[in-house]
Image (cartoon, rainbow, N blue to C red):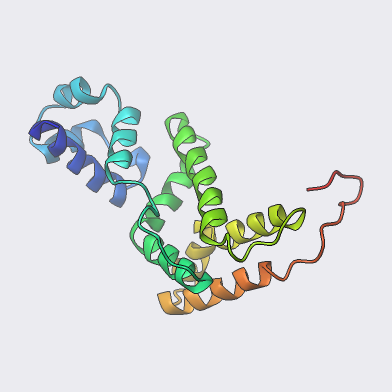
Amino acid sequence: MSGTKEQILAAARSRFLSESYEDVTLNDVADDAGVTKQTVLNHFGSKGELFLAAAESTGPFRAEYDGSSVEDAVEFLVDEYEVYGDTLVRLLSVEHRVDDLVPFLNEGRANHTRWVEEAFSQDLPGDPDRTIVVHAVAAALDVHVWKVLRRDRSLPADTVVAILNSLVRGAFQTQPVTTPKGGEKI
């Protein structure tokens, strides 16, 4: 990767991590990188493409997880949210207005569910309850839950870890799957 392209990506990562997507401008990224807006456009084509390239260049989320317990997984995830959680919450808050974000955020949701299935595979029940428990754990570990506990209630990270562990353990205590009123099996 060229030095110029890496400078632009570094500037974009910094901006997207610290500001709302809508507040980040190509001019600001260009200024931070010491290039022109046209140079940014020549390398990336659009703000949306620049965002995706910057997000990709941070590396895959949760790739380094190799824990073996519920507690390890929850602590790992909270550590990740301490770095990226505020950015994710900001992105999620504007997805209904910014079409460029929708594929990225949908992929993130799918990856979160896959990660839950992998990280908790030893603890998950068999079918038909498995799907319910996976969704319950994924919801308990959603970035919005972290935000409510960590940002809205100003709880320390270790307290958030304890609460999320409790929620996850509760999800494993699921009752057998029943059909909701007038609905299909989940």
Nearest to the observer: residue 44 or residue 70:
70
Which residue is situated farthest in the right direction here? 182
Nearest to the observer: residue 164 or residue 72:
72
The residue drawn where x is 54% and y is 63% is 145
The residue drawn where x is 58% and y is 56% is 138
Count of marks overlaid on the render: 0
Nearest to the observer: residue 149 or residue 6:
6
Q: Is residue 6 above or below residue 115?
A: above
Residue 157's spot in the image, x, y percent?
Answer: 41, 74
Residue 128's spot in the image, x, y percent?
Answer: 77, 53
Q: Could you tell me which quadrant the N terminus lies in?
A: top left
Q: With 40 as the anchor, is 45 left or right in this view?
A: right
Q: Is residue 97 above or below residue 130?
A: above
Answer with the quarter of the image where residue 132 lies.
bottom right
Q: Is residue 73 above or below residue 180?
A: below
The residue drawn where x is 83% and y is 47% is 185
Residue 162's spot in the image, x, y percent?
Answer: 51, 78
Q: With 178 as the anchor, is 155 left or right in this view?
A: left
The residue drawn where x is 49% and y is 39% is 107
Answer with the quarter of the image where residue 110 lies.
top right
Q: With 143 as the anchor, is 31 left or right in this view?
A: left
Residue 146's spot in the image, x, y percent?
Answer: 49, 64
